[in-house]
Image (spheres, helix red, strand yellow):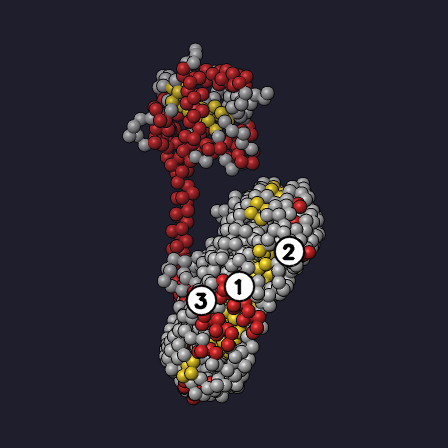
Amino acid sequence: MVPCAGREMARVLLMLLVLGEMRPVRCLAFKKCIGHYFQKDSFTCTDMNISRLEDAVSDIPTNIRVLNISFNWIRSLPPKGLGNLTHLEDLRLDNNQLTTIDPEAFWNLSKLRLLNLSCNHLKSLNLSIFNMLPNLTSLILRHNRVAEISAESISPWKMLHLVDISYNALRNISSFITALGNLSSLRILNAQNTSLSSLEITSHFPPNLTHLLLANNSISELRTPPAFFANIVHLDLSYNRLARAEDLTLLDLPRLHSLNIQGNPLKQDEVLKAVQNLNAPLTNITLSHLQLKDLGTLQNLCEAFRQKGIHTVWLMANGLQRVSAAFTQCYTVESLDLSYNRIKKPDLFTCQGKRSNLQALNLDHNIIRDVSLCDWRPGLSQDNGSIPCLEQLRYLSFKSNHISAIRSHAFQYLINLEYLSLAINEINFINVSAFAGLTNLKHLSLTNNAIGEVFHKTFTPLQHLEVLKIRNNRIPIVYSPTYSSLTNLTTLDLGGNHIQNIKKGGFTGLRSLINLYLDRNWLPDIRAEMFEDLKSLEVLDIANNKLSFHCTHLKSPPFVHLHKLRMLKLQSQEFGLKMLPHNLFKGLEQLKTLDISNNKFVTLNTLPFHLLTHLEQLYMSNICNGVQTMHNLTFANLANLQVLFLENVGLESIRKTLFQNLTNLTTLVLRSNMIRVIREQDIPLLHNLHFLDLNFNPVACVCDNLWFQQWSRYSRVQVVRFYQYQCEVEKTKLFAEFDSSVCNDGFVAFCATAPIIFVLILMAVIYQKGKWNIHYGYYLLRAWIHEYKLQRGSSKDYQYDAFVSYNSKDEDWVFDQLLHKLEKEGPPYHQLCFHHRDFEVGKPIVENIVDAIYKSRKTICVISKNYLHSEWCSMEMQVAMYRLIDEHSDVLILVFLDEIPGHVLSSYHHLRKLVRKKTYINWPADEAGQKLFWTKLRDALKKAHPPSEEKIHCLTQYTS
């Protein structure tokens, strides 16, 4: 008959033989790549130290559409290396070490549309590289060393829509432009930072090219044919060396709508001349970084904008400081960006003249303290010729300024404003009438300020507000009814404040609220009354607060009113959630996503998820508090769960019973746990599982894991980075390379060595389990001989009244109470034997124990929970019990310091037997009981009972 271990080994061998004959339909344990969680036809092989293309593509499915092999060490692309990926549409090979590409590298990739070869070391492009890419629409070659591209190289690019050749060394662009002339589909050409010094071109651009980016070159003149830019719609010439207006005004730009000339050495008058005389239907112009500070120049530019029909103007980083009424004549401009200047007072307009058409104004990154946009002089009114100021403005941003207060009616004339940002300022006061007149405002951002309190009347005018962001301020309490007037609000962001309490009715009136962010606050608890008015809430973020739970059942579950909630975030509480009451999520019948990661749990045995029957995604990583043990029914009701993250939760094994009910699970992440062995019976039958991540587990290279090694290779589940798993002990070896023949040869070795090993193990077990019994037997024999010698003497002369057996952790009671009462208070005075004081130095400790017990008239055992766990104490009691049985005399006194239940004593059968047959001893807690205790103890020490009496003195517990 084959032993059990032998049968198991035989079964594994049989499985290996069968697998050796099988040819898998599909392998999902990829050596260097990972399939995306939710996009099955997309694979990522980034940052995997791949040096050969074959290592990445040899085992991935042939029908994928997206492949990313960026951030590796590939130096060359071999012929037909990607030929099996016939459905590939998007290929990223950026951030490698590519220097050469074989002419047939992209063979058979007829469906490829995007090819990214940026950030490599390519110096030239072979003539035939792209012959096999008839449908290529986007080619990105940024950050290479390409110096020349011939017409022959480009001729196959018939379908190209975008070419990015930026950050190369393409000094001579003439031949390149000539080659591009035949690409009728080309729309966008990015040639930024290509070391171009001039555009001396005699050929024509592709007929349909509309976007030409030539920024960050050294172009000082443009010598092109008259119709060279005939079809260009967007032209970027920023950060070149154009110093004369003629370089631009002599160009024929019949379709140009957007021009960027920022960062060129153009003087103010040259800029003005260029704008005035440009032969183009401009609508968008960027004049940033040109030192346009003069008010007169700005006013003249406004007139030129009006004449040319320019409605979008970028004037960033021009060093502007005083702008008083400078843009009054820019009434045709619809979008104006004045960010990154030095503006202190933004009084850009007056309320006289024609109505402004300005719809978007950006004043970010200035030094503005007052938000007044119009030069409103005292005495002006609509009756004396004034007009509403900026009544068409819809977008206004004051981000990153020095605003500290918002005065009353600060925006009253912006009656059509829809977006207002006052983020990243120093605001600590907002007048209750600050937003008066903003009846059409939909988005208000007050993030990153110093706001300590907001009032109900502050938001009363904002009847159409949909998004309110007050993140990263200093609000301590949400009062009622601060937000009650915001009936159309859909998003309220109060994260990053100091909120410690939300008063009842704090969110009254928010009947349309969908998203509520309360993360990074100081909330110590949450209550149902806080959210009772949020009937439409779908997303609730309470991460990074101070929440914790200490009971298994809540009288009032906090989310009971949130029946439409789809996402709940509770991760990263300051002290950890500790536990999850079993009814915590009551009311969340529609919850789809729950995140409780980064919390420390004492227990998870309350089955908190049993009500979340519609949950689809559960994130509970980093919840380990030592070794975390989950109840086998933790996920029992989550039949709809699709994604489960259990990274670093202290799992020591994959328990089949824990996951077996997750029939719709597709993604299971078990990274950074303590899983060493994975057996066949551990893997649950999850038919929809596609993605299993076991990275950073101490997987052992042992025969018990042989089944898992084969399963990872041939199952339909993708075991992420399986080929990078390292052996637990030998970190230099890989688990996938563990040699199964070791297990095969081991079967014969097992049969030969098993009997010997079994005998050795048996001897070791017998010694380990019975060494104390052996010691006891030896010393009890010596005790019997010692007693026999004493009995042969004429009389017994005891040196001590009692030997005290106790655990060192109870020595405070022994010294403060027992020693003091019996040796120092009397009469009578008793002489006690203590091991630390009376044992003979140099004598073996077991021999000291036997001598002490037999030299004492009695033995007092001070029993506690600590006593029960001590092997020395157990030995002392057994020697005393032997003496009791041998002499048939009352020599043993038991004193119980702790209340020890019977089921605990059942593990100590000698003591349990005594307690069941005899009376037992307890130390009382009250003073009256203690007086009785000492009386009975002294009585027990002096009495001498007849040999026939089998009684152990009892000091019963005195109850008050």
Q: Earlier in the sequence, mark 1 or mark 3?
A: 3
- The vertical placement of 439 against 769, above or below, is below
Residue at image point 47% right, 16% down: 938
> Residue 246 bears which disc, if any?
none
Res 700 visible: yes
Q: Is residue 786 left or right of residue 177?
A: left
Q: Which of marks 1 and 2 precedes in the sequence?
A: 1
The residue under label 2 is which amino acid type?
Answer: Tyr
Q: Amino acid at mark 1?
A: Asp
Residue 589 locus on image (x, y percent): 68, 54
Residue at the far top: name it.
Answer: 827
Label 3, secondary structure: give it: loop
Residue at 57% across, 45% down: 429
Residue 108, given in percent of the width and then of the height, sits at 49, 84
Q: Nearer the viewer, residue 516 or 380?
A: 380
Alpha carbons under labels 1 and 3: distance apart: 14 Å
Percent from the top left, x then y, of residue 705?
46, 61
Tag shown at residue 337: 1
Q: Specify few, some or many for label 2: CA neighbours under 10 Å numbering under 14, 14-19, or 20 or more.
A: many
Q: In the displayed structure, does residue 247 sit left or right of residue 530?
A: left
Kindly indicate whether the residue at mark 2 contacts the one at mark 3 (C-beta within 8 angstroms). Answer: no
Of badges 1 and 3, nearer the viewer stands: 3
Question: Disc 3 designates what residue?
Answer: 290
Q: CA distance from mark 2 to mark 1?
A: 20 Å
- Judge whether residue 205 can be spotted in this image: no
What number of labels is visible?
3
> Considering depth in this image, is 748 or 374 the residue closer to the camera?
374
Which mark, residue 413?
A: 2
- Amino acid, disc 3: Leu
Q: Position of residue 51 (x, y in %)?
A: 38, 72
